[in-house]
Every structure is written in C-alpha cells, then in structure tokens.
Image: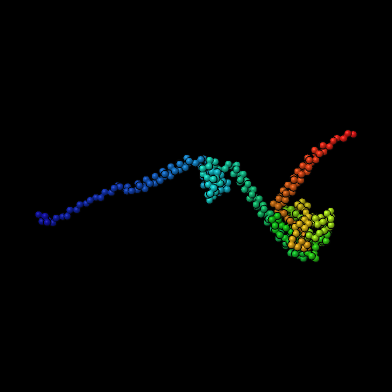
Amino acid sequence: MAASGKPLQPIIIKRVKKGGHGAHGGAWKIAYADFVTAMMAFFLLMWLLGSTTEGDRKGIADYFNQPLKVMLFGGPGSGGATSILQGGGDDLTKSVGEVASGDVEDKVREIGAQLARAEAIRLDKQRIATLRDKISEIINVNPKLAEYKNQIRLEMVQDGLHIQIVDEQNRPMFDAGSALVKPYLRDILRAIAQVLQEVDNRISLSGHTDATPYGSGERAYSNWELSADRANATRRELVAAGLPEGKLARVVGMADKQLLFPENPTDPRNRRISILVLTREAEERMTRSLEAAAEVSDAGQAQQAVKAAPAASARPSQGR
C-alpha cells in the first residue's frame, strides 16, 4: 500500500508494434512481378519479330487466321511440315512467304474442277445403276422376256453397265455359222433399245464366239468375221428399234479371245453379244486411245512416204 493508505495501481505499458511495410503491405511485389513478366513477353515478341522475315510473319498470321486454307494451299512461310495442320513449308526460317495469290487461285480452280468432275462421275454411275434396275424390271414384268431371263446378264463394271446376251445349248441367238438374228433375240434387243434411249451414255457392241474352229485356210471365213458380223447384226436391230446411230461408240468382233468360260472353250455360253453402256470417263478414255492410235498410224504412213520419196527421185529420167 502507499503511505496515504491507498492501494498501489498497476502500471500498464502499451507497446505499439510497427509494421515493416506501412499501409500498402506486400502487394507491390505482385505488381512488380506482373510488370517484369509483361516486359519479358514484350522483349521476347520484339526479338521474334526482329529475327523472322516478312514472309514468315505473314505465314504465321495466315496460319492462325485461316488454318484450313494454309493446310490446303501451303507455302514456304506457312509453318513446319510436321504440324498437325501442315502449312506446307519446311520450317519458319524460310525467306519466302505464302504462295502468290495467282497460284492460290489456280489451286482453287483446280480443286473446284476436281470436285465437279467427281460429282459428275457420281451422277453418271447413279444414272447407269438406275438403267440397270430398269432393264431388270422390264425383263421381269414382260412374260416374253422373262422366259429368257437366264440368258441375260446385267453387271456393273468399272467402265459402265455390261449387258450380255448368251447362247444356251438348245436356245441359240443365231443359227450355227450365221449372223441372222433369231426372233427372241430381236425382242430382247428392242426392249433394251427403248431403255437405252433414255440415257445420254454411248455404248460399245462386241460379238463373241466359242473356240470351235470355223472355216478352213488362212483366207477363209473365220470366227473373227462371224463375231464381227453378229455384232453388226445386233447394231442394226438396235437402230431399227429407235436407238440413234450417234450413241454407238464402237462395234467389234472378238472371236474367241474373251471367253466367258475359259475352262470350257467350246461351251455354248461363250457365244454371246455384249452391250457395254459406257460411263463418260470410259468414253473419254476410249476416245483418247483411238486418237492416239490414229496419230501413230498417220506418223507411220508419213515415215513410209519420206522413205519412198528418195527412192523415187533416184530413178533415172527417161527421154522420149
């Protein structure tokens, strides 16, 4: 107690703890780190811009703006060839930029032409498939033709629709050694001709025989002449039924060189008439091959004429 008799009061000392960062705390460190990161990115960007060519920069910009276009048309400055969507270039150090606009337009036109051609081929095949179904339906619903259904073969091949009318042992299309059309074959050909008029595709006719020898001697009438005559007889029947002459692309005799049953060369079913409804592509290919053969023939005749000219000029002139 104090001398006055009052109890002593405890002495309380308040110590104020001062913060080391003031009112702002440590937020400035985060801001500084963001600033340094941004500066680093800025200087990295400047370095990249300074170390690449104008063409490379344009290629990179085109890649990110239109990746599909760059993938299709490429260009040396479009990016590495190992990327997922290849830009067409080898690497980013090339000094040449994206392909010229004229080249791009040419490629666009080329791709457009390819797409148009593919669509035309698709429609052509679809049209020929519809033709096959229609011929098959006509054969089934016509009692006269349904009787010969087993002798009519319809097959889709690479060059178009292959229609084959084959002989049977007791039901031949022609008399032996003759090109005279049997009545039932005439009915079949007339029905087919009516359907063929509905499409613009041209056709190729070929006659075939079996391997039974016909005629004697090198200059005698043979299976070659017989197959060609039968193909021509078929052509006449189709034209008489209304098929325009302009739709006939080729009429050939094949003799026994394309047997239907090669394991049995004398089988009557090897004797047949083949009608091939050509696709546009097959027709163009045939036309090119015929033109090439004509050019070779003309070149051969020209060479013979050139060789014959010196021989003629070497003859001594005779006085009168």
- Tell me if I can see residue 136 in this picture: yes
Given residues 271 and 257, the one toward you in this image is 257
* Image height of 159 relative to 31, above or below: below
Given residues 180 and 259, the one toward you in this image is 259
The image quadrant that residue 124 belongs to is: bottom right
Left/right placement of residue 36 relative to residue 79 reads left
The image quadrant that residue 77 belongs to is: top right
Quarter of the figure that contains the N terminus: bottom left
Q: Residue at x 26, y 48 (%)?
A: 18
Q: Position of residue 132 (x, y in %)?
A: 71, 59
Q: Residue at x 88, y 34 (%)?
A: 319
Given residues 248 and 226, the one toward you in this image is 226
Given residues 23 and 224, the one toward you in this image is 224
Q: Position of residue 11 (x, y in %)?
A: 17, 53
Q: Position of residue 255 (x, y in %)?
A: 78, 57
Query: What residue occupies the far right of the structure in this picture?
Result: 320
Left/right placement of residue 67 relative to residue 309 reads left
Left/right placement of residue 100 relative to residue 43 reads right
- Tell me if I can see residue 127 in this picture: no
The image quadrant that residue 170 belongs to is: bottom right
Query: What residue occupies the far left of the structure in this picture?
Result: 3
Q: How many numbered marks does the figure carry?
A: 0
Quarter of the figure that contains the C terminus: top right
Q: How is the model colour-coded?
A: rainbow
Q: Residue at x 78, y 64 (%)?
A: 168
Q: Position of residue 173 (x, y in %)?
A: 80, 61
* Image height of 109 relative to 149, above or below: above
Q: Residue at x 32, y 47 (%)?
A: 24
